[in-house]
Amino acid sequence: MAVPELRSWRATRPQVARAADAVRPRLARFVRAAGPRVARCARATAPRLTRITRPKTWQYTAGAATAGLALAAGVVTAAGPWDSTGQRTAERDRAVALEHTGGTDHGRGPGTSGTSSGSPRPAPSAGAVLTGLGGTAAPGGVKAAPGDRAALADLLDPLLKDDPALGERRAAAVVDLTTGKRLYGHGVDAPLTPASTTKIATAVAALTALGPDHRLTTRTALEGDTGELVLVGGGDPTLTAREDPRGLADLRALAEKTAAALKKRDLRKVTLSYDTTLYAGTETHPIGVNENLARVTALMTDEGRTDDSTSGPAPRVPDPAADAARTFAGLLKQYGVTASAPGPSKATARADTLATVSSPPLSALVERMLTNSDNDLAEALARHTAVATGKRADFDGAGAAVTARLKQLGLPVRGARFHDGSGLDRTDLVSADLLTALLAEAADPARPRLRPVLTGLPVAHFTGTLADRYTDGAAGLVRAKTGTLTGVNTLAGTVTTPDGRLLGFAFLANATTDAWAAQTTLDRAATALASRTP
């Protein structure tokens, strides 16, 4: 049942304000610098206008980059790819790359448009704006949005209720993350196909079930009575066999350590097998063979990709576990141990563990999953949620485990259906009410373990699946998870208003006929939120 306010957040208002105090001064300055231009962009959403004005992206892109971190500033250095200031390194590097000539000049040199003389317009320097989120706290901290619902409806209705680009079935919700109060709603209870915004639910469930410091471990075990060496899959799709592991669990290191342990036992020839029994059920997603994900198995390297990619669609090996085991056999040979052709098996409780390698912490995996919309990681984390909660680690069990975790948190799961962890299954159902409740839960200062859900969201025109969007509006001000299937377009995340208020939003459109038009309308709605104080 929909409620106009998430009651559990009433008690958190003072803590949220304190958590935001440290970011208020610079955040407000950054957003004020971007506000006028974004506002001009958003005025195109008024009922009588149909197009977006087009301010130059460079005028405010770098200056807005940190805005979406308001509530996460107190804990961001504890997880994920952060520098010492709490700024995501990828965003900082992206902003610096866009800076071109540096200083307060974001132009591309003499002759660029911007003033009558042809010299570039001044804009905040990326280096200066992205240095950190500290500073003297402003009296009163971050204020709650006043909740002018009528004004917000006038702003959003022409897009979210009336625009035909969003198809026949749509829903939307906007909440103030300071109070949990709903500021706007349309069809908030309606369960719709969420596409990849499902990953927000997967992230919350996995972090609550496992904790942000949990790591996925791949190991080798030696059966003492038979001398069989078993490569035991730990459900880590990011396990890598590449020469540069880049901080991921390293199959080469596992082979080196295993070979050293075998040589201590005077073993230089072994029978090799592999164990994928951490997971149960079919490995094939209901969509079938697809370049958007590999077979869901507890053992694979580099997500079963056959190219050098690390994200997005890619060709996949037909049997990721067998391929990983064959690769491991080849690596053992490089370290002086000959292994037989591997086959499937199961390590017994009597087997001695020889060596292990572990993934980055779950907090970093969640960020990667959300930023890149990583389907392989999403399915893995849903299954690990099932394992941690005593459910069967198959598609059904993973969906049941995610639902159970969200229900335990008191979130509005009525009508929700999770048949996978990635959102590729078209039978998944989620409401706008649930998506905004998930974002509010992740913003709660009492739940710092959930902060990667916010910090992992792609940043408009900076990172992940939003890197190429918002080129004409709200760059850096919107952090959101995208969702796209044929006939389905969704967007859910956070946006910072011109005076520094942090809002959560969820927009879902089903039965769309023009994906580009629907995506554009959703982006305009988020841009409109970034343009004004509700």
Image (cartoon, rainbow, N blue to C red):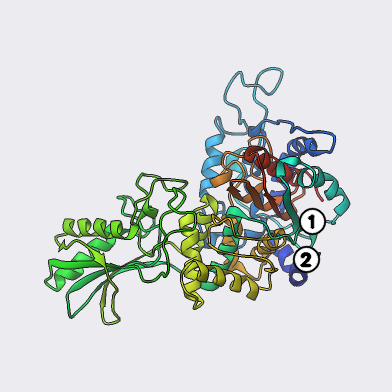
Give the number of marks.
2
Residue 42 in view (yes/no): yes
Label 2 – label 1 distance at C-alpha: 10 Å
Query: Which secondary structure, mark 1?
Result: strand
Residue identifier under label 1:
185
| Image: 112 above or below 5 | above
Could you say where residue 273 lies in the image, as x and y percent from the top left?
Answer: 24, 67
Tell me which corner region of the image, top left, top right, bottom left or bottom right, holds residue 43.
Answer: top right
> In the rendered view, does 184 fall on the left or right side of 346?
right
Residue type at the position of mark 1: Gly
Q: Position of residue 489 (x, y in %)?
A: 64, 47
Q: Which mark is drawn over residue 231? A: none
**Three-letter code for the amino acid on which mark 2 is drawn:** Ala
| Pointer 2 with pointer 1, Cβ within 8 A | yes
Check disc 1: other Cα within 10 Å, few if <14, some if 14-19, many if 20+.
many
The image quarter in which residue 181 lies = bottom right
Q: Which mark is residue 2?
A: 2
Residue 497 coordinates in the image, percent (x, y): 75, 48
Residue 13 in the figure: left or right of residue 59: right
For marks 2 and 1 on the same chain, the one whose residue lies earlier in the sequence: 2
Q: Residue at x 16, y 58 (%)?
A: 333
Front position in the image: 339 or 489: 489
Whether residue 364 appears in this view of the structure is no
| Relative height, residue 201 to residue 290 (above, below) | below
Can you give x and y, in whole percent of width and height, for residue 193 in the image? 64, 55
Depicted 377 relative to depicted 489: above or below: below
Rendered position, 165 above or below 389: above
Q: Residue 247, located in which quarter of the rendered image?
A: bottom left
Q: Secondary structure at mark 2?
A: loop
Left or right: 92 as drawn, with respect to 266: right
Crowd band around label 2 with a 10 angstrom C-alpha radius: few (<14), some (14–19), many (20+): some
- Quarter the N terminus occupies: bottom right
